[in-house]
Amino acid sequence: EFSYESEEGKQTISIPPSLLISAMGQVEDVRHCVTMDLKEVGNTLYVVGLTSHELGGSHFALVEQLEGGCVPKVDTKVAKQTFQAIHQAIRSGCLRACHDLSEGGLAVGVAEMAFAGGLGVSLSLATVPHNIDDDDQFDIVTLFSESNSRFICEVPDGKRADFEKLFGELPCAAIGKVTDTGRAVIVRGDGTPLIDCSIADLKEAWQSPLRW
């Protein structure tokens, strides 16, 4: 329930769990809009933002019927700097695609970008910026944590230096490439495969619950 004050006094609204909340804004130049679909084979994929052990309330916890855990906490200072750097990257033409890592985390965000663009990805978790100190949970947390203020960014090789300069000391690292394989491949730091799946299968898994 959501409560607020009005001229008639305190009002309460019941919000159904399935409610979708959207926001819209004006854009001065539509050419500066960046979509999430991958654009070009060979481009580099970056993770922006720090991944923490924050599976509490996550979609992974919901699917696995887990309770407890730490929920994401926002570092407002770093978040503001991150959003400013993303905006500058967009304005300077460094970004071909960009997607947040909210519901589902890194694994879901990358999958959505891949099947939206009809291209594959090859990633390693070795360079993902993180402060995870639990080796036993590292893979799961890195793939599915929903830590705030994080993005996957597709950057052309000719723009990598400019992109990295914009982020300075902020958490930001290259983790892989856009490929023409039609597959989403994610490996550990030692090269051990974690995920190797057709993007067609990923898209079907995403769309099938909507066919009701």
Image: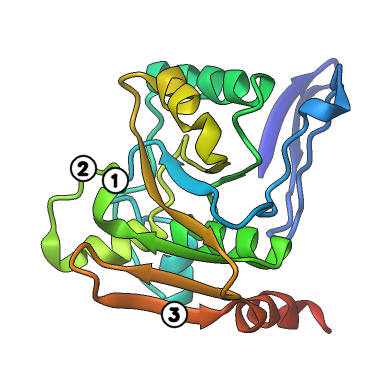
Q: Nearer the viewer, residue 119 or 12?
A: 119
Q: Between disc 1 and disc 3, whose residue precedes? A: 1
Above or below, comparing residue 53 to residue 184 in the picture:
above
Callout 2: 10 Å neighbours few (<14), some, many (20+)? few
Q: Between disc 1 and disc 2, whose residue precedes? A: 1
Q: Of tags 1 and 3, which is closer to the observer?
A: 3
Q: Which residue is mark 2?
A: 131
Task: Tell me the SS state at disc 1.
Answer: loop
Horizontal side of 205 relative to 59 (left or right) equals: right
Q: Which three-letter amino acid code belongs to the residue tagged 1?
A: Ser
Q: Which three-letter amino acid code belongs to the residue tagged 3?
A: Asp
Q: Nearer the viewer, residue 135 or 29?
A: 29
User: Is the residue under label 3 in contact with that under label 2 (CB below 8 Å)?
Assistant: no
Task: Give the residue drawn at x 18%, y 67%.
Answer: 190
How far is disc 2 from disc 3 in space, using C-alphas? 26 Å
Task: Give the residue drawn at x 27%, y 48%.
Answer: 127
Q: Which residue is mark 1?
A: 52
